[in-house]
Structure formats: structure tokens, C-alpha cells
Image (cartoon, rainbow, N blue to C red):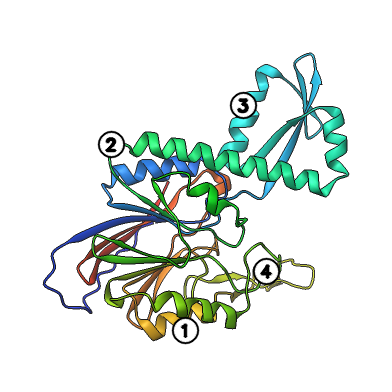
């Protein structure tokens, strides 16, 4: 599915093009991350941008039974079969931990031990991604501007800073080829009480301080994890008190769940481009006043890359195109 949109609002004498590839909500899928890196080379982009939610949500314990046998969710597999399970887990964004029986029994009764297993797996995955990116992009000089989303623990900021190829700094302004890129990963409250949520008034206050650092809004790129409210980017199933989708007339009811503060700050400042994620099922583009906003969507657990190629020319968006595969 491809969409193309040309924007001619701003006039400029600049002929400098900037090609960026944006994706979000990779949720620990090695397959999606590798596809994203490779797509950056294929489309000859100047920069890669990741909009947050890089951490996975699930960890499966693998119990070492001895004698080259393992228990994976009550299925006994041999050591020769183990690698295929691990590769599938990594593709689908599922963490794993190989534990002895005693370690498993202790962790199953200890929330702190479970949290430590998650933390170890999350950090190990990000460090492996760093090596992948550095290896595949070393001859291309393509930076990766990356932010954390609401599902990402804050300690990942320090881990990401270990790599020079990743440009990370929530609230900082990155001047890149004459464009100013700013990132923000907090979202308005969700039913799941995730790591990085704030009330709308707090989000607005944060964003007001961040965007005040920008010198030229007509060449500003907002990498904000939550989509702006009441757009094509923020449609999600309406949930009941049990967090189950409401169905009427045999169809799921959808509602707008984006951030009103993010919409407000876009309306007030009119940046060139808004890049968003968070709502996996709401791939689309829209306009908030004169600003093009894009959500590429996500199907990370199927190993599918959802991305958006955006070509900027001076103070205009020359074209944008969704990439799926």
C-alpha cells in the first residue's frame, strides 16, 4: 500500500533534499530492525528515525532439564531444536531466558527476579542491535535518531548512548542538514499503566519547553511517539471495563486515543513534519493545519516492517511513501 502526497505550502530557494526513513514500535523484533536498516541503504536515505517502543513485552523462560533437553512452555525440545525456537522468538520480539529448574522456580515466585530477567534481556537485545547497525551502516554514514516510547524503561537512554551511530536525547534539538529534529516519548494515559505516561497538561508543558528551542519551525521535524488526537493516526478499538474491544453490529468500535497536547503544540507551531507511532493499527497520514503527520503502523510480531520514506526539499515535503514488507 503506497500513498503519495506533495506539499507546496512553504516557498524556498533551497534545493537541498533530505531523505529519511521512519519506523516505530519495533518491540524487540530483530527481523523488523534488520529490515529497517537494510531499507535505509536500499532507499539511499540520509537519516533513519525510530519513534520509540523498541523494548519487547514478553519473556519466555526456557528450562534446562539437562541431557540436552529443554522445556519451552511445557514442550520438551532437544538442543538441536532449541535454536529454531530462539530465532522465532527474536523475530517476533519475544525475549527468552535459559534457566535451571531451581532458577525458574525462584523467579516464578519473585517479581524482582522477573524484572531483572527482563532488564538483562532488553539491554542485551539493544546492544546486539547496536552491533548490527554499526556493521551494516559503517560505510554509509547514516545516523539513527532514536527515542524511547511509553513501553520503554528509562535506563535504555544510557544504553543507547553507548553507540555513536544512535542519536538519542529526549527534548534535545538535533540540527541535521539544516533541519531541526526533536523527540518526545511520553504518551497520554493508557489503560495499561505503561512506563512513560503523563497527564495532558504535563505533556503540553514539556513540549512547550522543548519546541521553544527550535529556531525555524518551517524546517522542524517532530518525532513524538503519541499521535495527535482526532486524526487518521490515532484510531484504536474502544475498550470495555475488562479491556476487551467493544463490538456493535458485528464490528469493532473504534475511537480516537491520541494526545490532545501533541495536536495543540503542532497547531501552535506548525512544524514541517510530524512523525508518530504508538497506535499500531492506525497506519496513515493526515494534516494538522499545514503540518503533515504520519504513523507507519506496526506488525512487529509478524516480522513485517512498517516504515515511511519521506523526502524533504527545503521547507517543503516533496513526497512521502509507506513501505511494508
Q: Which residue is under mark 3?
A: 84
Between disc 3 and disc 4, whose residue precedes?
3
Tell me which residue sits at (19%, 68%) in the image. Answer: 314
Rendered view: 265 above or below 245:
below
Tell me which residue sits at (28%, 47%) in the image. Answer: 43
Q: Quadrant of residue 82?
A: top right
Disc 4 + disc 2, Cβ < 8 Å: no
Local crowd at mark 1 within 10 Å, few (<14), some, or many (≥20)? some
Q: Secondary structure at mark 3?
A: helix
Can you tell which of label 3 and label 4 is closer to the viewer? 3
Can you tell which of label 3 and label 1 is closer to the viewer? 1
Q: Which mark is residue 250?
A: 4
Q: CA distance from mark 3 to mark 4?
A: 39 Å
Q: Is residue 92 visible?
A: yes
Can you tell which of label 1 and label 4 is closer to the viewer? 1
Query: Which image quarter holds the N terminus?
Result: bottom left
Between disc 1 and disc 2, whose residue precedes?
2
Amino acid at each position: 500500500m503506497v500513498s503519495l502526497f506533495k506539499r507546496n505550502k512553504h516557498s524556498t530557494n533551497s534545493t537541498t533534499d533530505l531523505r529519511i526513513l521512519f519506523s516505530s514500535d519495533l518491540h524487540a523484533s530483530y527481523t523488523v530492525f534488520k529490515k529497517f536498516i537494510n531499507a535505509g541503504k536500499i532507499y539511499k536515505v540520509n537519516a533513519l528515525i525510530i519513534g520509540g517502543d523498541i523494548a519487547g513485552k514478553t519473556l519466555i523462560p526456557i528450562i534446562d532439564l539437562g541431557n540436552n533437553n529443554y522445556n519451552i512452555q511445557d514442550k520438551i525440545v532437544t538442543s538441536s531444536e532449541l535454536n529454531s525456537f530462539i530465532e522465532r522468538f527474536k523475530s517476533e520480539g519475544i525475549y527468552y531466558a535459559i534457566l535451571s529448574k531451581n532458577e525458574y522456580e525462584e523467579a516464578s515466585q519473585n517479581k524482582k527476579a522477573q524484572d531483572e530477567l527482563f532488564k538483562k534481556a532488553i539491554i542485551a537485545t539493544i546492544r546486539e542491535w547496536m552491533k548490527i547497525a554499526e556493521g551494516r551502516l559503517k560505510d554509509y554514514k547514516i545516523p539513527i535518531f532514536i527515542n524511547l516510547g511509553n513501553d520503554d524503561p528509562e535506563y535504555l537512554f544510557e544504553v543507547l548512548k553507548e553507540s555513536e551511530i544512535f542519536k538519542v536525547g529526549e527534548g534535545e534539538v538535533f540540527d541535521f542538514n539544516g533541519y531541526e529534529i526533536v523527540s518526545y516519548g511520553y504518551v497520554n494515559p493508557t489503560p495499561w499503566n505503561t512506563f512513560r505516561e503523563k497527564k495532558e497538561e504535563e505533556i503540553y508543558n514539556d513540549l512547550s519547553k522543548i519546541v521553544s528551542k527550535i529556531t525555524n519551525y518551517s524546517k522542524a521535524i517532530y518525532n513524538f511517539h503519541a499521535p495527535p488526537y482526532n486524526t487518521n493516526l490515532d484510531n484504536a478499538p474502544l475498550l470495555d471495563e475488562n479491556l476487551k474491544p467493544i463490538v456493535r453490529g458485528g464490528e469493532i468500535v473504534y475511537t480516537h486515543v491520541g494526545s490532545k497536547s501533541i495536536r495543540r503544540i503542532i497547531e501552535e507551531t506548525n512544524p514541517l513534519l510530524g512523525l508518530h507511532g504508538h497506535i499500531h493499527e492506525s497506519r496513515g497520514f493526515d494534516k494538522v493545519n499545514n503540518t503533515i503527520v504520519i504513523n507507519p503502523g506496526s506488525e512487529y510480531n509478524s516480522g513485517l516492517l512498517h516504515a515511511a520514506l519521506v523526502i524533504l526539499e527545503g521547507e517543503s515535503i516533496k513526497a512521502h511513501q509507506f513501505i511494508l514488507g
